[in-house]
Amino acid sequence: MITAFIPVRGGSKSIPLKNIKPFCGKPLVCWNIEALENCAEVDKIIVATDSDEIETTVGKFNYKKTKIYRRSKENASDTASTESVMLEYIKAVQMSDDEIFMLVQATSPLTQSADFTGGLTMYSSGQYDSILTCVRNYRFFWNTDGTSQNYDYKNRPRRQNFSGMLMENGAFYINTVANIKSSRNRLSGKIGIYEMPEYTSAEIDEPDDWIILENLMRRHILSKNRPSKPEIKLFLSDVDGTLTDGGMYYSENGDELKKFNTRDGMGFQMLRERGIKTGIITSENMALNKRRFEKLKVDFLIQGKRNGGKLEAALEICSQLNISLENVAFIGDDVNDVELLSKVGFAACPADACEEVKSVPAIEVMTRKGGEGCVREMVTLVNKM
């Protein structure tokens, strides 16, 4: 019997309720749960929490192998160790000494099913009493007395000739119940090291870590899991919060003003030169929108579309062009864009889009914000397809 154990407290101070905060479109803890659900070697997944919110969130997904364990208040405090809650669970359910116990940390969401399988396969060889995960670090380390730890500074090695150092990344640990009870530690005896890719070195502890790991997730994992994009024949964009910064500006005379980005305008020209039709679909109905997009020479301008009307408008344009939504690229930033974003062949959003939009499956999140060139950034991606 192999049990994967994920301890998640509700009392994180640096990032409140971080374990269920949306990470690349789904609650943070769910990335490890789903990787474990897809790992055939794992029989049971235990999410040990003290939080009603975490229990409710995990329960909504109806996972097959995953169960909730309500850890004690004492073992959910800031000072409680991970080992204390491991031992609490082992005792509470009376786990057998020969069972395999795998501690999994939700703060390492880049761990894949293949990593869990690889670690368990390594453990099953019988060569080790316990396993931990590491990444190979190629930095040069020094002691406080001015002496180098891992290289000769007089003969500085090139990276390709430098073996580096193994650094614990905290993704998971494997041991038997008997060993954990005896040593009261996640590791004991002869320890084996399962090496993971260098990009998995970071864990989420602070807000900056979140930004870094989301970018790493999109680059190294999500980008490889996306289906191939179809041929794009129509490019559609929202206005407020996408082509503009979402701000509402007023002159002394009460005239409403908006700020557009000239680079986005060049993006529309680039699409036109490639023969890709362009269009604007917006919930607002304003004369200044019309003036701006007449200058941009867009093929379709549809205003005043609310409450699902954007999808309807896109379908009307597709009918005129005799294409399907699979041939459409659309960029939007708010909840009224979600329906259309969920159905087009290529969906994108600005860096400052709302969380509901960023949660759309396979959406591309731009590095630029609305009104700061995010549309031009998406056009560049379309032109590479």
Image: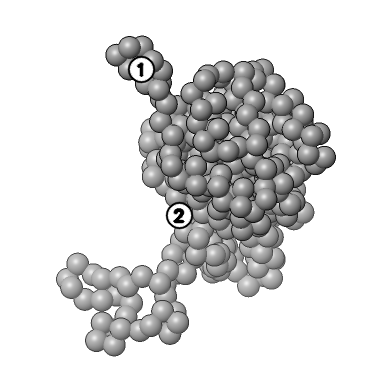
Circle 1: is it few (<14), some (14-19), or many (20+) Cα within 10 Å?
A: few
Image height of 251 relative to 325, above or below: above
**In terms of secondary structure, where does tag 2 sit?**
loop
Instruction: Decide which of 343, 2 is in the foreground and name it.
Output: 343
Circle 2: is it few (<14), some (14-19), or many (20+) Cα within 10 Å?
A: many
Residue shown at 51% from the left, 28% from the top: 291
Q: Is residue 1 visible?
A: no
- Residue 125 at x, y percent in the picture: 69, 70
State the separation of the CA atoms marked 2 and 1: 45 Å
Q: Which mark is residue 250?
A: 1
- Name the image quarter holding residue 207: top left
Q: How many marks?
A: 2
Q: Which mark is residue 29?
A: none
- Name the image quarter holding residue 165: bottom left
- Residue 335 at x, y percent in the picture: 59, 25
The type of residue carrying mark 2 is: Ala
The type of residue carrying mark 1 is: Tyr
Residue shown at 50% from the left, 31% from the top: 292
Q: Which mark is residue 202?
A: 2
Instruction: Decide which of 37, 259 is in the foreground and name it.
Output: 259
